[in-house]
Image (tube, rainbow, N blue to C red):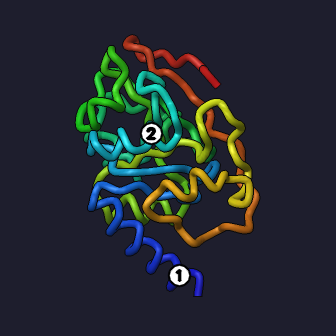
């Protein structure tokens, strides 16, 4: 039953992503708001939903190391860790310009969650993953903590894992140009 529901939810979310819309979905860490990470207009919608200034970075998710290699040249072993780990890469290519910092860097994580991995794989492009909250408010641990304002402003709500408590946000590391890693969170 779960896989049938998951396939239906992937199909529904895919339709929204392809049309430039936004989704509210469970990730490998917390509930997230997502969109096509290559679509500038879709990214603007997420900043608007979160009431977030556009110079505060958003994370993107990829399904696997192959998708990651399309966006950045150096991939440290830390990106392949079992625990969700977001890495800020320099000189990222292929993402919407409004996801990139002024220096061209962006935070990217290989998704560990089965639904996310499958959705991104079928979509064929990275998707944005930002916490499902208004900027400055606490990140919800479960679906019931997500504000009605967020729920009413996304284009689609994924109907999976709505009764589960989620993990904490991912670790965040910065890959320096010399190959060294700096822990941020």
Residue 106 at x, y percent in the picture: 39, 28
Left or right? Give the position of 94 relative to 181. Answer: left
Q: Nearer the viewer, residue 27 or 16?
A: 16
Dot 2 lies on which element?
Answer: helix
Looking at the image, the residue that sits furthest to the bottom is 1
In the displayed structure image, the side of residue 156 where residue 163 appears, left or right: right
Measured as percent of width and height from the top left, residue 163 is found at 73, 68
Pick the quarter of the image with the C terminus: top right
**Residue beneath label 1, please?**
5
* Residue under the point 50% across and 85% down: 4
The residue where tag 2 is placed is: 48
- Residue 92 is situated, as x and y percent measured from the top left of the image, at 30, 28
- Quarter-of-image position of residue 165: bottom right
The N terminus sits in image quarter? bottom right
**Residue found 62% across the figure and 38% down from its top:** 170
Q: Is residue 161 left or right of residue 79?
A: right
């Amino acid at each position: 039953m779960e896989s049938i529901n998951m396939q239906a939810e992937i199909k529904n979310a895919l339709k929204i992503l392809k049309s430039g819309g936004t989704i509210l979905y469970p990730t490998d860490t917390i509930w997230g708001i997502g969109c096509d990470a290559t679509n500038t207009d879709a990214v603007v919608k997420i900043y608007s939903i979160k009431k977030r200034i556009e110079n505060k970075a958003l994370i993107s998710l990829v399904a696997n190391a192959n998708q990651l290699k399309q966006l950045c040249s150096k991939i440290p072993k830390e990106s392949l860790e079992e625990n969700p780990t977001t890495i800020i890469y320099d000189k990222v290519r292929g993402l919407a310009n409004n996801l990139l910092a002024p220096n061209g860097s962006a935070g990217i994580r290989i998704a560990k969650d089965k639904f996310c991995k499958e959705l991104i794989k079928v979509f064929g492009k990275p998707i944005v993953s930002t916490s499902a909250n208004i900027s400055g408010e606490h990140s919800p641990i479960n679906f019931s903590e997500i504000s009605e304002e967020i729920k009413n402003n996304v284009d689609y709500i994924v109907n999976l894992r709505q009764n589960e408590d989620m993990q904490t946000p991912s670790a965040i590391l910065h890959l320096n140009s010399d190959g060294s890693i700096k822990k941020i969170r």
